[in-house]
Image: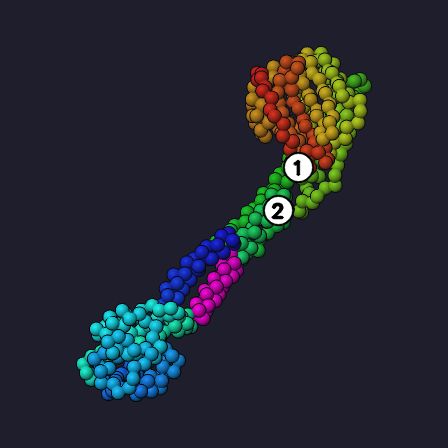
């Protein structure tokens, strides 16, 4: 905007300066020309009294020499032959034919002189300038011609200086206009830049950012609206945290009952699994309450990480027991090495449980599944595949809150997986697995790999669709 205003101001000012300076420069040139020829006419008029009295050569020479133009050898007098018949002196070197003679240095052509002798003033071009030919009536009734030489420097006297002054004034106007437009543009741009920076910081999670009101009325109104919006967002987030904390806290009572009932189940694999599940649920609820109660501006957390292979082995021990009870075949591959990912351990556990829980909730008992881990230089890929009916609409399954997977589906399971993957710069894809059912691919970008520059872009494979959506 700033440079646009400068360019517009520059164009408008240049057009205005040209519209006034060019005609004014031409007027100055014309005035200088008129002034030079008016002076020449004045010089010619000074010799008229002498011509009206006498045509004597000596007297006319003294009259011409006494004038300014004659002293500068810029004046000549052409006497016709009839008038020269009464002269008492011998012919001079400039005398013409038939007894006509001239006084002073003549530059005009004889034909131009004869034309002027008919009683018409004329201006003719001569080498180095112009010649003013002014006819003057003599006592004999004939016309003598007074010639005044006007050099080019006299015609253009002061024009160059005037044009230089006009050019300087025009440049001054252009520079002043550009400077004023730049200051005006800066006054408009700075509030807009502050508003843009504040919007970017708010998008990064800095909820305490506010915009100082300034600039034109429209930008001040935008700043007021932005600050009001930011305050509203902070209030809504605070209300959401309180609501999440309250809802989470309400789960403590049924969790306490579950824990007591699980403690009374006695010994056995099923009892141990139930007690472990209740303990994990209690830990998750406590962590949710603590996170929801956090107040103040969001701060950068230190980089967290965990061994994905270790976490997968641990969670598969839990889910394998349940799979054995339901007659499912569970395969595990690629977890024999270390694969560290920039994800906190609880978050990766929640993502794995969401993917594996979907297999148990949305496929019939006895459906086989597998978990594969692949590691490259820039990412760790976790594949959870099953032999179930598949997902008809993968895009809908990945949308948060799209809970059309049947009773008990909230639509948040795969959204948890997606958020964990995108926190590293990766993503989640759903397709057809080699087992014939659904394959959920979680792409976790590593530090210094794709995660440094955003999600890694990979070509989509064509995916066949199954029967039921999964969450």
Q: Is 369 above or below relative to 13?
A: above
Q: Is 232 above or below relative to 181?
A: above
Residue 258: give x, y in percent of width and height.
72, 26
For residue 276, say whether it is visible: no
Instruction: Give the main secondary structure of the magenta stretch.
Output: helix
Q: Is 180 above or below relative to 204?
A: below
Q: Residue at x 65, y 22 (%)?
A: 440
Q: Residue 182: within the magenta? A: yes
Left or right for 165, reference 75: right
**Nearer to the camera, 41 or 424:** 41
Quarter location, residue 141: bottom left
Quarter location, residue 425: top right
Residue 201: image tag: 2
**Nearer to the camera, 377 or 350:** 377
Q: Residue at x 60, y 43 (%)?
A: 203
| Helix, strand or loop at mark 1 | loop
Magenta stretch? 160-185
Q: Which residue is mark 1?
A: 453
| Helix, strand or loop at mark 2 | helix
Q: Mark 1 or mark 2, which is nearer the start of the sequence?
A: 2
- Front: mark 2 or 1: 1
Coloring basis for residues: rainbow
């Amino acid at each position: 905007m700033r440079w646009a205003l400068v360019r517009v101001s520059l164009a408008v000012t240049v057009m205005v300066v040209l519209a006034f300076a060019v005609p004014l420069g031409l007027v100055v040139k014309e005035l200088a020309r008129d002034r030079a020829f008016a002076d020449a006419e004045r010089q010619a008029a000074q010799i008229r009294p002498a011509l009206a009295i006498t045509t004597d050569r000596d007297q006319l020479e003294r009259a011409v020499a006494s004038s300014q133009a004659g002293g500068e050898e810029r004046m000549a007098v052409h006497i016709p032959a009839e008038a020269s018949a009464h002269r008492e002196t011998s012919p001079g070197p400039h005398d013409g034919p038939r007894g006509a003679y001239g006084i002073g240095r003549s530059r005009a052509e004889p034909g131009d002189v004869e034309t002027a002798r008919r009683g018409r003033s004329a201006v003719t071009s001569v080498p180095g300038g112009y010649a003013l030919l002014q006819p003057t009536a003599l006592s004999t009734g004939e016309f003598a011609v007074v010639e005044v030489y006007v050099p080019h420097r006299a015609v253009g006297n002061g024009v160059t200086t005037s044009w230089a002054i006009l050019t300087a004034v025009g440049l001054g106007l252009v520079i002043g206009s550009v400077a004023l437009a730049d200051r005006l543009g800066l006054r408009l741009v700075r509030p807009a830049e502050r508003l843009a920076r504040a919007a970017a910081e708010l998008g990064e999670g800095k909820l305490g950012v506010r915009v100082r009101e300034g600039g034109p009325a429209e930008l001040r109104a935008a700043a007021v609206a932005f600050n009001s919006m930011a305050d509203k967002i902070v209030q809504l987030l605070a209300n959401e945290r309180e609501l999440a904390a309250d809802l989470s806290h309400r789960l403590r009572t049924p969790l306490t009952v579950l824990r007591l009932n699980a403690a009374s189940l006695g010994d056995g694999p099923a009892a141990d699994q139930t007690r472990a599940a209740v303990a994990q649920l209690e830990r998750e609820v406590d962590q949710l309450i603590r996170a929801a109660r956090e107040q103040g501006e969001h701060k950068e957390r230190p980089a967290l990480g965990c061994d994905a292979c270790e976490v997968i082995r641990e969670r598969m021990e839990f889910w394998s027991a349940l799979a054995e009870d339901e007659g499912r075949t569970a395969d595990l591959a690629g977890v024999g090495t270390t694969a560290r990912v920039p994800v906190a351990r609880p978050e990766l556990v929640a993502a794995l449980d969401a993917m594996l829980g979907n297999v148990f909730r949305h496929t019939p008992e006895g459906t086989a599944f597998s978990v594969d881990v692949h590691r490259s230089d820039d990412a760790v890929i976790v594949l959870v595949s099953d032999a179930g009916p598949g997902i008809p609409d993968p895009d809908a399954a990945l949308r948060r809150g799209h809970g059309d997977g049947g009773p008990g589906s909230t639509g948040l399971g795969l959204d948890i997986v997606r958020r964990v993957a995108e926190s590293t710069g990766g993503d989640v894809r759903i397709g057809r697995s080699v087992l014939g059912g659904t394959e959920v691919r979680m792409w976790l970008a590593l530090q210094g790999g794709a995660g440094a520059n955003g999600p890694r872009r990979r070509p989509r494979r064509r995916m066949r669709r199954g029967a039921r959506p999964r969450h």
